[in-house]
Structures are given as structure tokens and as C-alpha cells.
Amino acid sequence: MSKQDLAHLIGVPMDLGADRRGVDMGPSAIRCAGVLERIRKLGYEAHDLGDVPVQLPESRVVKGSRAKYLEEIAEACDLLRVQVKAAMEEGGVPVVVGGDHSIAMGTVAGVSEYHRAQGEKIGLLWVDAHADMNTPDTSPSGNVHGMPLAACLGMGDPSLTDLGGFSPKVARENTVLIGIRNLDKNEKQIVRDSGIHAYTMRDIDEHGMATVIHEALGDLTQGTAGFHVSFDLDGLDPSVAPGVGTPVRGGLRYREAHLLMELVADCGKLLSLEVTEVNPILDHRNDTAEVVVGLILSGLGKSIL
């Protein structure tokens, strides 16, 4: 069986990374929207590997304000790292659904570790309204879901940056951030100084999604085995995806998001995919989970004709 024929669904019911509750129900909502069955209709053999165990906030005590639930998040992300790496060793595309965006530290660690063992690098496409590049020293809230991209790049607490025993997980020149429009003041400077490729919503307004993603794909695939896509649903405009953890107006429109994912599929270099921050409590009739499933299918190769 070839890689393109197999998909592994992994749920991560994590809501330790943010103050607003509810995104832990995201994996269930996405499953209820029929994600596994619809992936199979594309011609994939698809397996649901279940959920990574995550501690409940009610059962834990916040030990520090700079990075809340740090130990619990690191533990869950390490379990996810192991499962993602094992899925890739079987062959196929891991499809990870969350859960708050802190789960990306585990997903990216697993994908990177698998390819690192083969002497290969990966690219990272991060779609988000926020940059997620704070660290415990810079975060105004202490919420870890605002730190995962920094951790993947080797910045932050060692329990997060060193998952799998190595850091960074991805090179800055192979990292692309798309859709940002809501950043902390200090975080803006971090992004400017980081060396990653960052496209704001103004860039997309001025140049169009097709131009942006074609340019981005060049950076993601330069000297890499392929790339991981980490898609925070708040990258979309709330009119498209109302049920998200931290909605911000002025985001990607429905067709812009699908064009992005369609061009990712056309590129043929997608290694893995995750979608995060679906909050059914804030949703309407599971509409946002339906949008998620559509985007996953586009990324896995569904086309209009």
C-alpha cells in the first residue's frame, strides 16, 4: 500500500492551553461530521487511532502563571509525538484533530523525528489568526496555546522544545505562517526577528491566496522531504467558522481556505495534517466541524472535477 492510500486519524481532546473551555470536544465534533467515512470515499484506507489521553483541568492545579499546565501539556504532546511517529512508520498520512493548538508541538515533533531518522528535514505551514510565537517569558497570559510555533522553532521551555530529545523541529527558512492578524506587541517583533516567512491578511488581500501559497510552497519544499500543515480554525473568518476557541474577524474566506488546501494537495508534498481549536460550545449545528472535514478532504486530494 502506498503512502497516498492510507490515513491515520488521531484525536487530541486538549483544552489545557487556553482559558476558554470547550475545544476538548473538537475531536468528537469532527468525528460526528463523518470525517473517517468521507476520507474513505476519497479512496483512502483510513484508520481511527482514537484519542491521546489528556489530563482534565479540573483534576489538576495550575503551578505557574507563565506557562499554565506546562507539565500536563508536555506529557500529552509527548504521547502524541510517539503516536504520530508510529503512524508514519506504518506508512500513510497522520490526520490529527484537536483540541487547542498546543497539540501541534507533539504532532510536529513526531513528524520531524520520523524524517530526522532518515536524514531529512520537514517544512511547516502554520495557518492561524495568531502567530503562536510567545514563550513563557513573553506571554501576557501564560496560555501555552500561544506558544507552540515558538517551541517548534526551538524557543521556550525545554520541556516543550526538546520533545523527542532534539530541537528545533523545523528550520526557520522552511517555516511559513499564513493568515495572521492578531498579535501581541512583543510578538510582532519576535516574528520579524525570527527569519520565518510570514504572510498577514493584508498580504493575502493585496496579492491573493494563489500567489501567497505558490510562493510559500517553494519555501516549504526547499531541501525538505515535504511539509506538515497545522491549521488553526481561527485562521478562518468567524462567518465561515464560528465555533472556534479565539475568533478574530477579518480572516480567510471559505474559498481562500479551500484553494490553499487544494494547492497543498496538488503539490504532492503533504506529509501530515492537523486541524485545531474547534469549539462545539460556540458552534451552530456543528457547522465548523463540517468546514473542518471539507478542508481535510481538500488537503487529501478532493477536487471539484
Image (spheres, rainbow, N blue to C red):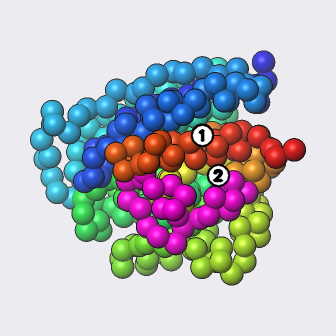
Which residue is found at the position 25% from the left and 32% from the top?
55
Q: Nearer the viewer, residue 46 or 216?
A: 46
Q: Quadrant of the N terminus?
A: top right
* Residue behind mark 2: 123
Name the residue type under label 2: Gly
Which residue is found at the position 37% from the left and 36% from the top?
25
Q: Which residues are magenta?
A: 237-259
Q: Is residue 238 magenta?
A: yes
Whether residue 101 can be seen here: no
In the figure, residue 274 lies in which quadrant?
top right
Q: Secondary structure at mark 2?
A: strand
Q: Quadrant of the C terminus?
A: top right
Q: Position of residue 215 (x, y in %)?
A: 75, 67
Q: Secondary structure at mark 1?
A: helix
Q: Earlier in the sequence, mark 1 or mark 2?
A: 2
Q: Is residue 109 magenta?
A: no
Residue 54 to residue 289: above or below: above
Which residue is found at the position 43% from the left and 78% from the top?
189
Apparent side of residue 112 relative to residue 206 in the rendered image (left or right): left
* Residue behind mark 1: 293
Which residue is found at the position 43% from the left and 72% from the top?
182
Q: Position of residue 222 (x, y in %)?
A: 75, 56
Whether residue 256 can be seen here: yes
Apparent side of residue 135 relative to residue 81 in the rendered image (left or right): left
Q: Position of residue 122 (x, y in %)?
A: 64, 47
Name the residue type under label 1: Val
